[in-house]
Each structure stands twice: as structure tokens, then as C-alpha cells.
Amino acid sequence: MAGQHTRLLAAVAAAGLVLAGCGGGGSGVSATDDVDRLEIMAPADPGGGWDQTARAMQAAISGADLAGSVQVSNVGGAGGTVGLQKLANERSDSYLMVTGLVMVGAVETNEVDKRLEDTTPIARLTAEDEVVVVPADSPYQTIDDLLAAVAEKGQGVSITGGSAGGTDHILAAMLLKAKDIDPAKLNYVAYSGGGESLAALLGGKVDAGISGVGEYVEQIKAGKLRALGTSGPKEHPEIKAPTFKQVGTGVELINWRGVVAPGSISVAAKDRLVKLVTDMHASPQWQEELKKKGWTDTFQTGHDFNTFLTTEIGRIQPVLKEIGLVK
């Protein structure tokens, strides 16, 4: 592998092309340097979606021989904002942090001084639809049934999901808003993991649940949960349920994941990281990781990703204010 890597570098240098960014600190980026030591930070504890993304990237980049070495580190806490603070102090030109919609909300709810706007956007990678479910014996047959019950009973209807201010909570608020239901009526029961919310649903402790499709799909297929709808732009291939747009709410929300770099890096270093991740995305190794994990490919880089990120921040802020999590 090392010999193959050296030959590739030689060919690239002879052609006068840039393969990727350099691997040292923040100084002296050469146009012909390969990424020697890439570090990918998952701003969460091991095992979750961000950690899985970081390690899938590590496997694909290493397998495609796109960097000398790839290390993954975990910096958990406060919806990823502890990791975001660490990124702000990082001076390496070959450092990436996994991020996503959850962090957009966490930045607002934790009132941190370092924001996603202070980073260098590199690429959006994947997305997962959200799904709203009820126990199989629930009286609610459609999302309209569930929302009508919230409008009538208010806090008497409980909806579980992940952490307060996270993707699941945001989707619940957006669905209520679409039906002009007072957000104060939302009885949202937050759990730190999908397993806990699943246990609450199956144990009859809550009326409905919201999570990424991957958390609930097996229980839906087994007939223990019933899907009322999904949040993506089109029907999910594994779930027989309409999208929320199809049923007239107009709500669309994907739990996306991507990578950003320190805000202090040069334009040249940014371009090399974008190319590195673009080469990773095109590799058979990454495509295999997507299939293995069941992730939707939503690849987008540079300016386009920056525009998407700005739009996401702009639409999530008012939702969090409406449910009282942000002043």
C-alpha cells in the first residue's frame, strides 16, 4: 500500500496537480504536499452517529490510500459544542470535525461563544430521514390524528425523542407550527438515546416517538410500531408511510451530517480538504460504507454547503424560540 501511495504522489507531482492538503500545523502549505496526518474529531462519545461517521471516513480514506494516516478522536459534551470550542483553538491544516443538524440546535440552546459560522465548511456527507411512530395498538392512525389530539389534549399527549433542542424536538415543533398549534401544548419527553425512547414507546409510557429511521425501522417492520410519516423529501424505501409534505404540513427536515475545519485555515488548505473529501466520496470504499450503514448520500461541498448551513441556522433559530429553548 505504501509503495502504491508513493507512486501515486509521484504521478500527481509530475502532472503538477494538487492531491490534498498538508498534514502539519498551520504554516507552509505546499501545493504538492499530501495529507500526511489527518485527524477527524467526533464531537460526541463513541458509538453515536457522529462517531460512526468519523470512523466510516477513517476506513474509506485509509482504504483508498488518500492520506498517510487518519486518526479519530472523541470530544463529547453539550450537543457537540464542547468539540466545537476545541475546533476553534485548533491550528492544524488537516483537521476535520463531524457536525450536523443536532449541533445547529445545540449552539443556540447552549448559548456558546463559538458557533458553526466560525468554522470552515468542507462538505455535507449524508442524511437520514426522521420518522414519527406510535405503538401498534395506538388509536392514532395518521399524523393528523396525532396532531389533532395534541391540539385538543395538550400536555395530555406525550411525544418522546432525543435531547431537548435536537432534531427530534425540532421536528415536533415544526409539525405543531404547521397546524397552528400552540407550542406550549407540546409535551416532549427527551431521552439521551434511541434505545430509551424505544423502551418508553413499547412500554406504553408515551403516546408517540420521533427519531431517525434507523432507530425504529426494525420495530416498524416487526409490527410493534406504526409509522405515521417521514420527514424527507420523498418516501423512504423501507417504510410504508407518507412524507409530511405529502399530507399537507409542508414540513421537510433531514438529519444531515457533514464535516467542517477550523475557521483559521487558509483558502489553499480548505481547497485541499475539500478535494480530499471529494476523492473519498468518489471512492468505492466510501460507497460501500454508505450501503453498509444505510445512509442517504447528500454530498455537497464548499460554497454550496456553506449556503445550506446558513439556511439551516436561519430556519432553526425561530423554531427553538417558539418552543422556549432560546430567548
Image (spheres, rainbow, N blue to C red):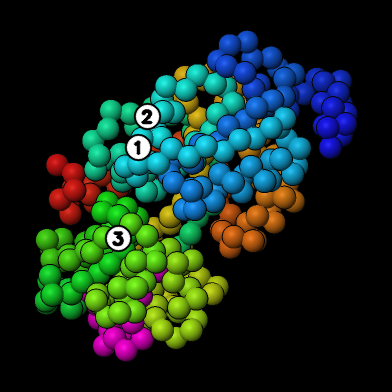
Total number of numbered labels?
3
65 versus 172 height, above or below: above
* Amino acid type, label 3: Tyr
Within 10 angstroms of label 1, few (less than 14), some, or many (20 or more) residues? many
Numbered label attached to residue 54: none
Numbered label attached to residue 81: 1
Please provide the residue range marked out in magenta. 130-147
**Which residue is rendered at x = 64% and y = 22% of the image?**
23
- Please give left or right for residue 271 compared with residue 222 in the image: right
Q: Where is residue 293 in the image (x, y as percent from the top left)?
A: 59, 60
Residue placed most toward the observer, 155 or 199 = 199
- Please give left or right for residue 144 compared with residue 4 in the image: left
**Which residue is rendered at x = 68% and y = 54% of the image?**
287
Q: Where is residue 289 in the image (x, y as percent from the top left)?
A: 65, 55
Which type of secondary structure does the marked residue at label 1 adopt? helix
Within 10 angstroms of label 3, few (less than 14), some, or many (20 or more) residues? some
Q: Quadrant of residue 89?
A: top left
**Which residue is rendered at x = 74% and y = 51% of the image?**
284
- Residue found at the far top of this picture: 28
Mark 1–mark 2 Cα distance, whole angstroms, equals 6 Å
Is residue 122 visible from the viewing direction of this image?
no
Is residue 92 visible from the viewing direction of this image?
yes
Q: Name the residue under label 3.
A: 191
Q: Where is residue 234 in the image (x, y as percent from the top left)?
A: 49, 67
- Earlier sequence position, callout 3 versus callout 2: 2
Mark 1–mark 3 Cα distance, whole angstroms, equals 19 Å
Q: Name the residue under label 2.
A: 85
Mark 3–mark 2 Cα distance, whole angstroms, equals 24 Å
Q: In the rendered structure, does residue 142 fall within the stretch colored magenta?
A: yes
* Amino acid type, label 2: Gln
Q: Where is residue 138 in the image (x, y as percent from the top left)?
A: 29, 86
- Earlier sequence position, callout 1 versus callout 3: 1
